[in-house]
Image (spheres, helix red, strand yellow):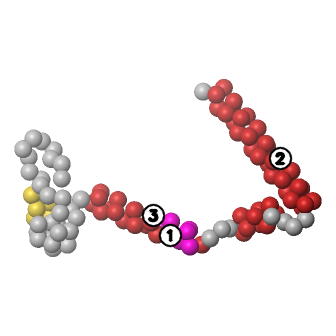
């Protein structure tokens, strides 16, 4: 643990076993982590890993599956219409992003 002043000792009571510890990150008796900030950080990291794991197991969404179907459709006309719509969407998003950038630049 960091000290507040040079040479000062920090006394922390372990929440697991009740032992008082001096200038230590882990309990000398049971080994538990004493820093509440680090405990919260570890919990957040575990929650983040669980969310990522669930997302990986879930697989692609219905929209992603539909886009793949349209890109690989057996009829060339359907593929061509999809490509035109997709390119139009990309251009519209690019123009919209540029307009938002110009507005932000003017306001700033």
- Which residue is located at x 79 percent, y 67 percent? 69
Labelled disc at residue 53: 1
Labelled disc at residue 84: none
Q: Secondary structure at mark 1?
A: helix
Which callout, 1 or 3, points at the residue further toward the start of the chain? 3
Kindly identify which residue carries mark 3.
48
Badge 2, how many Cα within 10 Å: few under 14, some, many 20+? few
Q: Is residue 7 above or below residue 107?
A: below
Q: Could you give the CA–CA distance between mark 3 and mark 2, rounded to whole angstroms?
A: 36 Å
User: Mark 3 and 2 residues: CB-CB less than 8 Å, in contact?
Assistant: no
Labelled disc at residue 88: 2
Number of callouts in the render?
3
User: Mark 1 and 3 residues: CB-CB less than 8 Å, in contact?
Assistant: no
Left or right: residue 8 versus residue 46 is left
Mark nearest the camera among 1 and 3 is: 1
Left or right: residue 38 versus residue 47 is left
- Image quarter for residue 7? top left
What main secondary structure does the magenta stretch of the protein show?
helix
Badge 1, how many Cα within 10 Å: few under 14, some, many 20+? few
Left or right: residue 34 versus residue 95 is left
Depth check, front residue: 76 or 3: 76
Badge 3, how many Cα within 10 Å: few under 14, some, many 20+? few
Q: Could you give the CA–CA distance between mark 2 and mark 1, rounded to whole angstroms?
A: 35 Å
Depth check, front residue: 8 or 33: 33
Q: Secondary structure at mark 3?
A: helix
Which callout, 2 or 1, points at the residue further toward the start of the chain? 1
Span of residues in magenta: 51-57
Q: Position of residue 76 (x, y in %)?
A: 90, 60
């Amino acid at each position: 643990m960091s000290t507040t002043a040079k040479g000062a000792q920090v006394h922390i009571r372990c929440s697991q076993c009740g032992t008082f510890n001096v200038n230590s990150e882990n309990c000398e008796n049971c080994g538990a982590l004493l820093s509440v900030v680090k405990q919260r950080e570890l919990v957040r990291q575990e929650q983040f890993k669980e969310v990522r794991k669930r997302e990986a197991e879930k697989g692609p969404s219905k929209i992603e599956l539909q886009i793949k179907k349209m890109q690989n459709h057996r009829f060339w006309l359907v593929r061509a219409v999809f490509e035109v719509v997709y390119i139009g969407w990309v251009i519209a998003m690019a123009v919209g992003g540029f307009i938002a950038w110009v507005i932000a630049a003017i306001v700033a």
